[in-house]
Amino acid sequence: MLYFDHNATSPLHSAARQAWLDATEHFIGNPSSLHRVGARADTALSEAREKLARILGCDALDIVFTSGATESANTVFHHAARTLAPDAEVWLSAIEHPCVMESARQHFPKRHRLIPVTRNGAVDIDWLTKNLKRIRPGLLSVMAVNNETGVIQPTREILALCREHGVPFFCDAVQALGKLPAASLGDCDWVSGSAHKFGGPRGVGFLKCPAKGRVVPLLRGGAQEEGRRAGTENVPGVLAMVAALEAREEGARTPTSAAATSAPSRAADVGVRAPMRTAFERQLRKAIPGTRIIGAKSPRVWNTVLALMPEAGCRIRWVVKLDKLGVAVSTGSACASGKEEPSPVLSAMGCTPGEAARALRFSAGWETTEADWQQLLAALVQAHREMQPTVRSRRL
């Protein structure tokens, strides 16, 4: 099966697998236990925390290990709801992942505001600059990379605006980690990450917290993670996560193009893998006229293509047809793939419900080859050809 759904989850990296196996054999103790077996596990956990902090560019004490990005996002808004003024608003981009969007709605049902995006899928900096001069929200949340379009958000500019106006900034970095250098992420107040998006195991992630101040825990019980997240730490999972991220960072830091900048938020489409995606898009538009690439005019990560396909059945039918041809793709966010409603991301970008119903997402992995992209193209052409009689008969 050819796998083009890495933005939903990625296969386990060999380095992560080995780190997990080693940890389950050598670090069997509870890190909170006082005996030497527990101390060894605690030491391994501390070393992993230091490694992750170096990657992000923050202090090790800022890192809290969680079960993933959903728990991390819920922790941020849970904390905000209990520490901000009763009338404080939270602002978040209109294209945030459901784990961020639903957390904000839960904790700030009448006090959240959506930041608009341009038709190219990037946060509207002009809108944000203008409105921050009038209102100061208690928290601002913008993802680093959109999970559906792959568009890189202007997080450096947004962080600068937040610093200017004294607003805490939360960045969901799930789709950026391993694809873009992570060194500047530690400058943000809050950062979330999820291991399974870059080759780590499922069920483990992290939350980078502000360097100062107390965090109101979402999960209560023991005093683990400096009292910020109760529950025995998943030592093998954490070590595997860090091992995977270290391996991915090597590729993300590789010099690529004169078009690249030092700020990941404005990086161009760069990397040794980017030309494969670019060639695929060009060939797809030629092979299946009427196909449109969403976010094509914005900087995007190298692995993601969101395409509006020409009319040939609904997007679910495309996915089923491609699956039968041996290719796994998705319709957008994996968290919403079973719903019939239009993608909130595409709606925010100005797409009609009819257009959104034809969206397919192709997300490659680090080991995806040019031959894989060509096989995907061939499958799309075949699927389109097989669906044409249905379209013609419906029009008649």
Image (cartoon, rainbow, N blue to C red):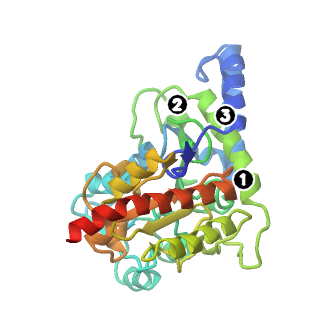
Q: Position of residue 10 (x, y in %)?
A: 57, 44
Which of labels 1 and 2 is toward the front?
A: 1
For label 2, count other residues whose C-alpha is less than 10 Å away and answer few (under 14), some (14-19) or many (20+): some
Cα separation, mark 1 vs mark 2, equals 28 Å
The kind of secondary structure element at disc 2 is loop
- The percent position of residue 226, horizontal first and vertical second, equals 54, 36
On screen, residue 300 above or below 258: above
Q: Quadrant of the N terminus?
A: top right
What is the secondary structure assignment of the residue under circle 3?
helix
Question: In percent of the image, x 28 and y 69: which residue is there?
Answer: 392
> Label 3, on which residue?
239
Q: Residue furthest right?
A: 255
Single out the mark in the foreground, 3 or 2: 3
Report which quarter residue 87 is drawn in.
bottom left
Quarter of the image where one finds residue 88: bottom left
Residue 24 versus residue 166 in the image, above or below: above
| Circle count | 3
- Crowd around label 1: few <14 · some 14–19 · many ≥20 (10 Å): many
Residue assigned mark 2? 224
Q: Quadrant of residue 383?
A: bottom left
